[in-house]
Image (cartoon, grey):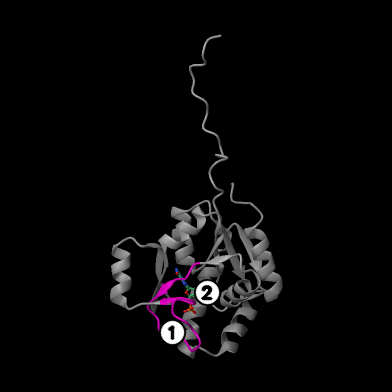
Amino acid sequence: MSADPTPPAEPEHDAAAPRRGRLTVLAGPTAVGKGTIAAYVRTHFPGVWFSVSMTTRRPRPGEVDGVHYHFVDDHEFDRLVEAGEFLEYAVVHGAAKYGTPRGPVERVIREGRDALLEIDLQGARQVRETWPEALFVFLAPPSWDELVRRLVGRGTEDEAERERRLSTARGEMAAQSEFDEVIVNDDVRRASEELVSLMRSGRTDR
Ligand code: 5GP
């Protein structure tokens, strides 16, 4: 019997290699409740690993450095940008800089764990460029009026800032079709469970 001259095809999955985890990116307009969903998932689904972003904004009461964000100054942020340490970064709401440190995400995915990024639309678009196999989830409000009501209701922004955020939100709402999945945040528990079940549904092999 003559030997087959063609080398065997690379196996699609190397049985010896550990399963890689899945990266999920959650984005959505201002005041849609991304933070609330993230908090619910943190509490109820401890198996989900959350990226801790760097930001140049000041901590709010109750926020812990290294838990909610790594709080850094402008100089340090720019140094990390130069060093290529971010998977993505953006100036959000024309104010502070935010970025996802690359190293921890890559390590967690290599270790086979599932990771979640809660970032803005500009950041989601950057991740799409460099990590297209991630799952991109858009969190939408039940309606535009409800989004306005939530933004006014939380009372953390003044009138001018609200207007600015709503104008950004209009553009962000139009970007829904860029995402793999849309979750309507009509109920925090339901929406959070839908997110986690999407993360676990094995849809990355697109
Ligand atoms: P906040 O200051 O209210 O915590 O977040 C403001 C916005 O920044 C939210 O839309 C949040 O999703 C976004 N954000 C938080 N971390 C990151 C990040 O690492 N990268 C990007 N691009 N946006 C982020």
With respect to residue 61, does 54 lie above or below? above
The residue at which mark 2 appears reads as: 169
Residue under the image location 65 percent in, 57 percent down: 200
Residue under the image location 49 percent in, 20 percent down: 6
- In this view, the residue in front, 186 or 147, is 186
- In this view, the residue in front, 112 or 151, is 112
- Do we see residue 186 in this rendering? no
With respect to residue 70, does 13 lie above or below? above
Query: Which disc number belongs to residue 130?
Result: none
Amino acid type of the residue tagged 1 in the rendering: Pro
Mark before the other along the chain sequence, 1 or 2: 1
- Do we see residue 69 in this rendering? yes
Asked whether mark 2 and ligand 1 are closer than 8 Å, the reply comes as: no
Where residue 191 appears, as percent x and y from the top left, is 68, 70
From the viewer's perspective, is the residue at label 1 or at label 2 nearer?
1
Where residue 35 appears, as percent x and y from the top left, is 56, 76
Amino acid type of the residue tagged 2 in the rendering: Ala
Where residue 140 appears, as percent x and y from the top left, is 62, 70
Where residue 185 appears, as percent x and y from the top left, is 66, 73
Q: Quadrant of residue 74?
A: bottom left
Disc 1 and disc 2: Cα gap in Å?
23 Å
Residue under the image location 54 percent in, 51 percent down: 20
Q: Please rate how many residues cluster around mark 1, counting C-alpha atoms within 10 Å: few if below 14, some from 14 to 19, many from 20.
A: some
* Magenta span: 51-70
Tell me the SS state at disc 1. loop
Magenta stretch: includes residue 77: no
With respect to residue 93, does 21 lie above or below? above
What secondary structure is the magenta-colored segment mainly? Answer: loop
Quarter of the image with the N terminus is top right
Tell me the SS state at disc 2. helix
The residue at which mark 1 appears reads as: 59
Residue under the image location 51 percent in, 14 percent down: 3
